[in-house]
C-alpha cells in the first residue's frame, strides 16, 4: 500500500514537470510592491497591447480624467533615471530596486520637490528642457511609499493617466505588470469579434477567393461560433487571425489578451503568450498583427501564424509556423482559445473542409520585382534609387512600383509609388530622389515627403551630389517638396492681451510649423535662458515664472524657433512686472 502511494506521488510529480512549462507564467505578487497610486486602479491599457510599431510596455492606470494624483515609490530603491522629453514618455522616473527589477513611471506632471530641484538645476546648467539623467546608486534613495511625483499627461500621452512598468533591471526587458497582484477587477472573458482566414499562396483559397476573408463571430451558450455556419470551405495552405480584446470590469477600454492557442483536431498547434518582450524585438508587432487592417480599418487583430522573418520570442509552440495544410476532402476541427491575465477564457470552435472542386477567383500578380525577405534589393530607375537591406521585410514582397511624371505647384520631382503603406517593413531603407533644376537655388530646403492619410508627412532628407537622400521606415508614395516657411510664434494667455504681467503666473506661446517640423526652440529673458516647457501635441511653449523672472521693471522676452530645414523666426516683447 505504501509502495503504491509513493509510486503515485512520483507519477504526479512527473506529470507536473511536463505540464508546468506549458502553463507556467511569471508572477510578481511575491515582490511586495505596493500600488503606485492610492486611487482605485482601472486600466485604459494593459501589457503587450498591439500598437503600430511597438507593443505597449506597461499598464495605463486611469486618473479620473485629470492630473495631479500622488505617485508613490512601489518599493525601496534609488532613482536610477530621470528623463524629460517633449514626446514619448514625457516626464518619467525610473527606480531600481534591490529585488532585481526596475519600476517606471511615465507621463508625469511634475516630480516631488527634491527631484524638481535636482532636475531643474541640470536643465538650467545644460540650457535644455529635454534631459536624460542617470543618478548614481545612493544619490537619490527612496523608501517604499515615498511620494515621488504627480500624475500627468506629458509626452505622447493621449490623455491624463499613469503609465507604469516593471522591467528586469539586468536587461531592461518590460514584464507583465498585471501579475503584480494589484487590486484590478476582471472577471470578464475576452471578446472575440472576427475570424480572419488567409490563403498563403496562389494554390490556396477560402470562400472561392484567393484573398483573405473575415467572418463575424457570435457567442452562443458561452462559446463563440462563426455566424455564417460552423464549416468553412477552403483548400491549401491557410493562416488564421483573430480580432479579440480583453475586457475589464467597469471600463469601456479594449485591451490585449495574455495568450492565444490554436488546436487542430484537439492537438495544440500554435501558442503565443505575452510575458516579456524586449524593446529590441517590439517592432515585430507589425508582423504579429494584421498591419493592413490596423492602418486601414483601425482593427487590431492577432495573426495566428508566423511570417518567415518574424523573430518574436512570444511563440511558445508552433507547427508549420501555424499554417494549416488542408487537403482534398479532409475536415479539420479548429479550436481557438484566448485567455487574459486573470485567466478568464473564451473559445471558438469551427471546421475547415478541404474542397478543391470549388471555383475560385484569383487575381494574378504582375509585379516586375519580387523581393525575397532574406535578400537586399536595389532599384535604380528614372529619378530615383531605392536600397532595401536584407531581412528588412517580414515576407517575400511582390513590389508594386510606378512613376507619375506630372507636376503640381510646390512639387519638385516625380512622384513615386513604392508599394503601399499597408505593408509593414521592419528596417529603414534608403531612397534617393533627383530634384528639378528649378529647385537648385533652394535645394537645402527640399524635403522627402510621403503622401499621408490626411496630410503630407515630412520624412527629412539631405542633399548630396544632386540628389536628396532619406532613410524611411514606411512603404508608400513619395515626392520632393520645399519647406521655405519659418515657424509661427503666437503669444497666448496673459501676454496675448497685454505686456503687463504682474498678475501672470506664466508666459506661453503657440508654436507651429507647416511641414518639416520644429527642430529647436530657445526662450530667454534679458538674454538669459529660462525653462520653457515644450508640448508639441498642444503646440505649447510655456514658462512658469520662477526665481529668474524679474520682479520689478521692464524685461525682454525673446523666443527663437527653427524648423528642420533651418527656417527661423523670432518673437520679441518688452514686458512689465511689478511685484511688491
Image (cartoon, grey):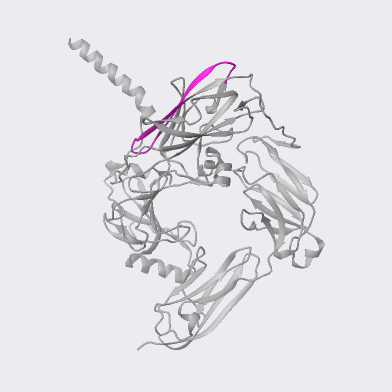
Please state which of residues 88 and 38 is positioned toward the viewer in this rendering.
38
Q: Is residue 537 left or right of residue 552?
A: right
Q: Which residues are magenta?
A: 326-349
Residue under the point 77% across and 49% down: 403
The mark total stands at: 0
The residue furthest left is 1
Pick the quarter of the image with the C terminus.
bottom left
Q: Which image quadrant is residue 152 in? A: bottom left
Q: Quadrant of the N terminus?
A: top left
Rendering coords of residue 301 (x, y %) = 50, 39
The residue at the point 21 percent across, 14 percent down is 5
Q: Is residue 9 above or below residue 184?
A: above
Question: Along the line of sight, which residue is nearer the eye, 329 or 229?
Answer: 229
Q: Is residue 66 magenta?
A: no
Q: Tell me where residue 23 appears, x and y as whole percent.
A: 36, 29
Location of residue 466 in the rendering, given as x and y in whole percent from the top left corner? 78, 58
When the figure is inspected, residue 536 is found, relative to residue 384, above or below; the finding is below
Position of residue 312 in the picture relative to residue 66 (left or right)? right
Q: Nearer the viewer, residue 333 or 389?
A: 333
**Residue 335 is covered by the magenta coloring:** yes
- Can you give x and y, in whole percent of width and height, for residue 495 in the image? 48, 81
The answer to whether 13 is drawn above or below residue 209 in the figure is above
Residue at 35% of width from left, 27% of height from top?
A: 20
Q: Residue at x 35, y 46 (%)?
A: 101
**Vertical placement of residue 457 versus 245, above or below:** below
The dominant secondary structure in magenta is: strand
- Is residue 374 left or right of 380 when viewed as pictured? left
Amino acid at each position: 500500500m505504501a509502495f503504491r502511494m509513493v509510486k503515485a506521488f512520483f507519477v504526479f510529480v512527473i506529470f507536473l514537470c511536463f505540464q508546468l512549462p506549458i502553463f507556467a507564467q511569471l508572477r510578481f505578487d511575491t515582490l511586495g510592491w505596493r500600488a503606485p497610486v492610492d486611487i482605485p486602479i482601472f486600466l485604459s491599457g494593459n501589457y503587450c497591447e498591439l500598437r503600430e510599431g511597438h507593443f505597449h510596455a506597461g499598464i495605463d492606470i486611469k486618473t479620473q480624467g485629470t492630473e495631479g494624483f500622488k505617485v508613490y515609490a512601489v518599493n525601496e530603491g534609488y532613482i536610477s533615471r530621470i528623463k524629460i522629453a517633449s514626446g514619448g514618455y514625457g516626464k518619467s522616473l525610473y527606480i531600481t530596486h534591490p529585488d532585481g527589477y526596475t519600476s517606471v513611471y511615465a507621463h508625469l506632471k511634475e516630480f516631488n520637490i527634491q527631484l524638481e530641484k535636482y532636475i531643474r538645476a541640470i536643465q538650467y546648467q545644460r540650457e535644455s528642457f529635454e534631459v536624460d539623467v542617470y543618478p548614481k546608486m545612493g544619490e537619490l534613495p527612496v523608501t517604499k511609499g515615498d511620494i515621488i511625483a504627480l500624475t500627468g499627461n506629458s509626452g505622447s500621452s493621449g490623455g491624463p493617466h499613469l503609465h507604469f512598468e516593471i522591467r528586469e533591471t539586468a536587461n531592461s526587458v518590460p514584464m507583465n505588470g498585471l501579475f503584480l497582484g494589484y487590486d484590478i477587477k476582471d472577471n470578464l472573458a475576452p471578446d472575440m469579434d472576427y475570424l480572419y482566414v488567409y490563403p498563403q499562396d496562389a494554390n490556396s483559397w477560402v470562400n472561392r477567393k484567393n484573398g483573405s476573408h473575415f467572418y463575424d463571430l457570435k457567442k452562443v451558450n458561452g462559446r463563440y461560433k462563426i455566424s455564417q455556419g460552423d464549416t468553412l470551405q477552403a483548400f491549401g495552405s491557410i493562416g488564421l487571425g483573430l480580432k479579440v480584446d480583453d475586457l475589464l470590469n467597469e471600463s469601456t477600454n479594449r485591451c490585449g489578451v495574455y495568450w492565444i492557442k490554436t488546436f487542430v483536431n484537439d492537438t495544440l498547434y500554435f501558442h503565443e503568450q505575452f510575458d516579456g518582450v524586449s524593446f529590441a524585438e517590439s517592432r515585430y508587432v507589425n508582423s504579429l498583427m494584421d498591419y493592413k487592417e490596423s492602418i486601414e480599418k483601425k482593427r487590431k487583430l492577432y495573426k495566428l501564424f508566423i511570417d518567415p522573418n518574424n523573430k518574436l520570442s512570444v511563440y511558445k509552440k508552433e507547427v508549420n509556423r501555424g499554417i494549416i495544410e488542408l487537403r482534398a476532402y479532409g475536415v479539420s476541427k479548429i479550436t481557438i482559445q484566448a485567455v487574459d491575465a486573470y485567466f478568464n477564457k473564451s473559445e471558438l470552435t469551427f471546421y475547415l473542409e478541404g474542397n478543391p472542386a470549388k471555383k475560385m477567383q484569383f487575381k494574378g500578380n504582375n509585379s516586375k520585382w519580387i523581393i525575397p525577405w532574406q535578400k537586399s534589393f536595389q532599384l535604380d530607375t528614372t529619378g530615383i534609387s531605392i536600397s532595401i537591406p536584407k531581412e528588412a521585410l517580414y515576407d517575400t514582397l511582390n513590389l508594386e512600383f510606378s512613376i507619375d511624371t506630372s507636376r503640381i505647384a510646390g512639387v519638385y520631382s516625380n512622384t513615386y509609388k513604392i508599394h503601399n503603406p499597408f505593408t509593414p517593413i521592419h528596417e529603414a531603407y534608403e531612397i534617393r530622389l533627383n530634384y528639378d533644376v528649378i529647385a537648385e537655388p533652394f535645394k537645402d530646403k527640399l524635403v522627402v515627403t510621403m503622401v499621408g492619410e490626411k496630410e503630407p508627412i515630412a520624412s527629412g532628407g539631405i542633399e548630396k551630389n544632386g540628389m536628396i537622400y532619406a532613410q524611411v521606415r514606411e512603404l508608400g508614395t513619395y515626392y520632393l517638396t520645399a519647406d521655405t516657411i519659418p515657424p509661427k510664434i503666437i503669444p497666448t494667455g496673459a501676454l496675448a492681451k497685454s505686456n503687463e504681467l504682474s498678475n501672470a503666473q506664466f508666459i506661453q506661446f503657440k508654436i507651429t510649423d507647416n511641414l518639416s517640423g520644429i527642430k529647436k526652440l530657445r526662450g530667454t529673458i534679458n538674454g538669459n535662458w529660462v525653462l520653457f516647457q515644450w508640448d508639441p501635441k498642444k503646440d505649447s511653449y510655456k514658462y512658469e515664472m520662477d526665481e529668474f523672472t524679474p520682479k520689478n521693471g521692464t524685461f525682454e522676452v525673446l523666443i527663437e524657433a527653427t524648423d528642420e530645414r533651418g527656417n527661423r523666426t523670432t518673437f520679441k516683447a518688452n514686458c512689465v512686472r511689478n511685484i511688491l
